[in-house]
Amino acid sequence: MCFWGWFSSHIYIKPFRLCGNGCACCSHAYLLSHWLEWSHLILPPPDCLPFFETCSLYHIWTIQWTICGSAYPSPHRGASALVLRTEGECWLFDCGEGTQTQLMKSQLKASRITKVFISHLHGDHLFGLPGLLCTVSLNLNPCPTQPPTCVDIYGPQGLRQFLRVALELTSSQLLFPYSVHELEPTTDQCPTEGQLSPDVTADSGRLHPQERAGRTIPLDVNSDCYVILEEKRFVVKAFRLFHRVPSFGFSVQENDWPGRLNTELLKDLGLKPGPLYGRLKAGESVTLENGQVVKPSEVLEEAIPGRKVCVLGDCSSLLGEGPLRACHRADILVHEATLSDEHREKAVDHGHSTPSMAAAVAQACCARMLVLYHFSQRYKPAAQQKEGDEDDVLELRRQAEETLQGTGIEVTLAEDFLTIPIPLIRLH
């Protein structure tokens, strides 16, 4: 997994000979890996990366901030948007004004975006979405033999109607289908004045020409979460946050990877490298020539835990037990820190958080890394700081680090075009 950022990226394609640990049908394969360089991290070449085992490629995940400011875009920082890149797909979290411009400045391709997650219906997280969809459509070269991929969009009730009106009033037609899946909020997610009237959010039932019918997703009372997506590779959940309007966070959990094959034991059993190794690796039992049945659990080492990334929308607090459950042991926890701790009262009054509040959430979740974002425009990026400036963005990191002292949780400040790779971590 990786959050995608905007720094130089070198791609290596290196052949390697399989050593009999699970190749299904070939004697050579190609390992495709990114050697990402960013502000303070250089990953070693693929030879040193534990991202593959025989034919299997442990896909790199990256998370990238296209823009990380709050309220409105400025010359030195845009509104909210970040991209999770995994296995050739790009998932966009929020789409503030100017997102498509930042994407054009990056190495990311907007056409690779297959899923969009909108945390709440404030403009600095949403106004860029209609324009982005139209621009992607304008630059799309349809393939006659392959239908375009449907873009799935997830967000609060009202998002479906917002997109329909925006696209219809501008006579916008898309060259690809899209579907909006709405999360049903609860009344305790915001003050009364922040709750939208049913007249505004009501589904008219009249689809946009390129729109496919989406789901309306209720809160699962048992898990206190919204189950958005369950598939072979991922489980994606949403959870409730408190803000001035209903706001949500999202958890992307990768399923565990199978452990290494015990090749010495397989050789003792008389099982030679080949397709049967691949079947065992895939979780299938195999029968030897002597009739003995070999189960994967007998020849596989402990599974490699999948990665978890959690992105929280604007909030001044979590609601219920769902957020802590969904974010438990997250590799990356992305949390807003609009104002510094000295302005905590003002932040909470406006439905926002401070660094120490974000740090408390990271500690409660036992996260590995806390990434702060959604800074007030009063905090300029470190590179833009001038002598005498009172509001230092680095102070936000110091405040979070002070709260997390002794926990081992790393704190990072998001910047436009920052990229953070998220490697798999073996237990031993």
Image (cartoon, grey):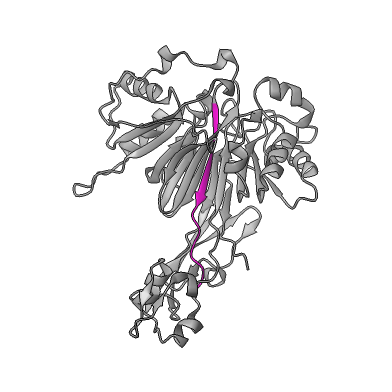
In-image side of 375 versus 109 (left or right): right
Quarter of the image where one finds residue 381: top right
**Residue 415 at least partly seen:** no
Residue drawn at 55 percent across, 28 percent down: 247
Please tell me in which quadrant of the rendered image residue 142 appears.
top left
Does 427 sit above or below residue 406? Answer: below
Residue nearer the viewer, 390 or 288: 288
Q: Residue at x 37, y 32 (%)?
A: 215
Count of marks overlaid on the render: 0
Instruction: Indicate left or right for 391 with 234 as reference.
Output: right
Residue 256 lies in magenta, yes or no?
yes
Q: Which residues are magenta?
A: 247-260
Image location of residue 320, percent across then percent down? 61, 32
Q: Quadrant of residue 181?
A: top left
Front residue of this view, candidates 425 and 123: 425
Where is 329 relative to 154, above or below?
A: below
Residue 392 drawn above or below residue 24: above
Is 421 or 416 nearer to us in this picture?
421
In the rendered image, residue 106, in percent from the top left (x then y), is placed at 48, 46
Residue 408 placement, left or right of 114: right
On screen, residue 425 versus residue 342, left or right, reads left
Residue 150 in sight from this viewpoint? yes
Residue 163 counted in the magenta span: no
Residue drawn 38% across and 68% down? Answer: 284
Residue lying furthest left in this view? 144
Residue drawn at x 70%, y 42% as measured from the top left: 364
Q: Quadrant of the C terminus?
A: bottom right
Q: Position of residue 140 (x, y in %)?
A: 30, 41
